[in-house]
Amino acid sequence: MTETLFTNARLADGSLKDIGVVHGRVVSIAPAGAKSDAARRIDIAGALLVPAFVEGHIHLDTSFYGDRWIPHKPCTNGFDVHERVAFQAENMARAAPMDERARNQLELCVANGSLQMRSHVMVDGSVGLKSLETILKVREEYRGIIDIQLVAFPQSGILKSPGTPELLDEAIAMGADLVGGLDPASFDRDLQGHLDVVFGVAEKHGVGVDIHLHDFGTLGAFTVEEICARTVALGMQHKVAISHAYGLGNLDRDAARRIGARIAAAGVSIMTNAPGDHAFPPVALLRGEGVIVFAGSDNIRDSWWPYGDGDMLGRAMMIGYRSGFYTDDELAAAFDVVTAAGAKALGLEGYGIALGAKADFVTLAAGHVPEALVAVPKGRRVFKEGRLVAENGAVVR
Ligand SMILES: [Zn+2]
């Protein structure tokens, strides 16, 4: 017997369907109005039903969302990661308790329809494992509402921050799911030494890697190539991601295609949030070469920038806007970045609207995906494994 039947759901191909869900999984997809013995019915009323969004890069420990407003402090002489890290430490000392701020951010993301998330959490000589301990507890509170992967993120560098290699190792043993990194060449000034630690810990524990890489130009591209080479050498294809990879946006098309083919062959994913006023990865070109490009909010109202609203559909719109995407296929590609491609990058099981998949859905007031992408409609209903978890911009319990 079907437990719940979602009726009159408009799928991406425009068809109206009834979707049966048992034990949180899709068991039937039939034309709307077909006979069913469902115990419970939820009428989607012709709204677009899409898989829940994948928030692929966020920082649950450092946002001030829901806390008081903290004005942005510019760097003294152009963007400088070291200086921003120092500003962040000052701000964090005055912020509301981390668990409160993390909950605020999670509620925002769930309300907007993200039910899978990858969050980086600071693990380094400055904060030790304290932030991770807090975020691990918050993750438990939200089990069954949102699935969260945690990256042990060495925000103060690995070689420059004493004890960080050991802390990364402990973080994975405690429950972090991936090892992070930060600008191996420009921050730690030792590309190979930094990657030795990151991939060493990942190999020891059999976990994935997700490295922040802000370096522009040749240095950024070179670092991408080195990460790809390590990934292949260790047989870690499809377990490694590079976040930002701004340098890929500085290359001419031929060079970008060559490196794109290399990234695809190494099974390395690229995360972009379509950042402000500088280069970012060429999304269409990389996808054309077979690279998995995914997205995240990254910082939301924190020490890095005041922007961010936790809405991955809005993020997809920004990616499309900044990429010059206009055709329906291009708009659908931007949507794919925050849905199916995100699921691939995060290695999620049972993603999508398909038989056997988890019934993680979002309803959107739009006729089709391209319209949803440009309109970014609110008033969504969000279902986790067939259960309503958010409605009209708020989590329901
Ligand atoms: Zn980040």
Image (spheres, rainbow, N blue to C red):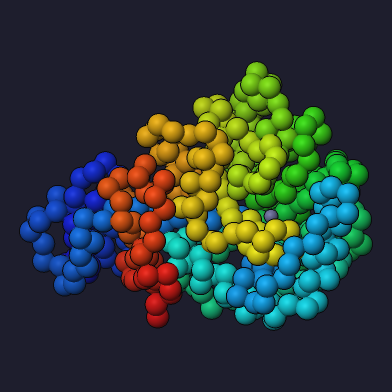
Q: Quadrant of residue 124?
A: bottom right
Quadrant of the displayed image that contains ligand 1: bottom right
Tell me which residue sits at (66%, 25%) in the image: 256
Tell me which residue sits at (66%, 38%) in the image: 280
Q: Nearer the viewer, residue 238 or 310?
A: 310
Q: Is residue 392 above or below residue 73?
A: below
215 sits to left or right of 286: right
The residue at the far left in this view is 35
Task: Mark yes or no: residue 167 visible.
Answer: no
Q: Is residue 287 above or below residue 128?
A: above
Tell me which residue sits at (77%, 73%) in the image: 92
Q: Quadrant of residue 383?
A: bottom left
34 sits to left or right of 233: left
Across and down, in percent, residue 171 comes to 73, 66
Q: Nearer the viewer, residue 335 or 173?
A: 335
Q: Quadrant of residue 283?
A: top right
Across and down, in percent, residue 354 comes to 31, 49
Task: Mark yes or no: residue 268 visible.
Answer: yes
Q: Nearer the viewer, residue 98 or 359?
A: 98
Q: Quadrant of the C terminus?
A: bottom left
Q: Quadrant of the N terminus?
A: bottom left
357 sits to left or right of 32: right
Marker count (numbered)? 0
Tell me which residue sits at (51%, 65%) in the image: 109
Across and down, in percent, residue 389 comes to 39, 72
Across and down, in percent, residue 162 comes to 92, 62
73 sits to left or right of 397: right
